[in-house]
Amino acid sequence: MPGSMPGLGGQGAPSGPVAVTAPAAPDLSPSRGPAFAPPIRPTLDLNQTRPDFPPPPPPNARTVEDFDTTSAEDRAEAVAAPVSSGERALGTTIATLGSPTDPGIWFKTPLVTAVTQGRIEYNGNSVAVELRPSGGAAGSGSQISLAAMRLIEAPLTGLPEVTVYAN
C-alpha cells in the first residue's frame, strides 16, 4: 500500500517523518500554589533548630565525613557525662537515619510534642541531642541525625532501639 508503514497495518499510518515531542513538564512554579512547588532539597525548619547548629553539608558531599559537619567541640559536648537533675525517661523507640543534609545532633520522635533538649542511649553510649517532634503516631519510630548516629556508634544502615530522655 502506498503511504503505509510496515507493522502498522497500513491504515492511517503517516507517510513521512513523525515529530516526537517530549511530554510537557509539570508546571511547578510558585504561582500554582505551594502544592505545586515542592522543595528540591529538604529545607530546615528554623523553628526546630538552634541557631548555633553546624552549617549544612556542601552540595558535592559524598562521604559520611562530608555530610557530618559537626565540629570536634560539638561532638565532645554531646558525649559529655549527662546531668541527671530533672531528667525524665520518655521511653524507647526504633530509630532510622534521618536526612544527612539536616546538620547537627538531633532526634525526631513522636515521644515529644515540642522541641526540647534531651539525651539518647544505645548499647551503653549516651549522647545529648535536640529532641524534635516527628508528628508521627506513638510507636511509629524515630529519626536520628547522622552525627548522633555516629556518636552512639550505631550502624548507619541499622535500626537501633534507643532510650530517650528529656531534660
Image (cartoon, rainbow, N blue to C red):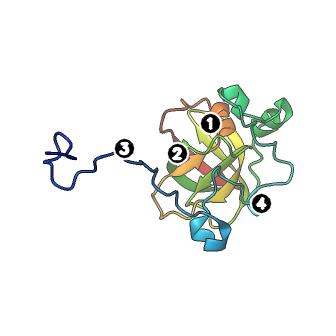
Q: Amino acid at mark 1?
A: Met
Q: Secondary structure at mark 3?
A: loop
The answer to the question of whether label 4 and label 1 lie on touching residues, with beta carbons closer than 8 A, is: no
Regarding mark 4 in the picture, which secondary structure is present there?
loop
Q: Amino acid at mark 3?
A: Pro
Q: Residues within 10 Å of mark 3 (few under 14, many from 20)?
A: few
Disc 4 + disc 2, Cβ < 8 Å = no
Percent coordinates x, y for residue 157 in the rendering: 50, 32
The amino acid pointed to by label 2 is Ala
> In whole angstroms, how far apart are the C-alphas of marks 4 and 1?
22 Å
- Per the rendering, the mark at residue 95 is 2
Could you tell me which residue is drawn at 37 percent across and 47 percent down?
Answer: 18
CB-based contact (under 8 Å), mark 3 and mark 4 = no
- Distance between the alpha carbons at the discs numbered 1 and 3: 58 Å
Callout 2 environment at 10 Å: few (<14), some (14 to 19), or many (20+)?
A: many
How far apart marks 2 and 1 lie (CA) works out to 9 Å
Above/below status of 105 relative to 90: above
Q: Which residue is mark 1?
A: 149
Q: Earlier in the sequence, mark 3 or mark 4?
A: 3
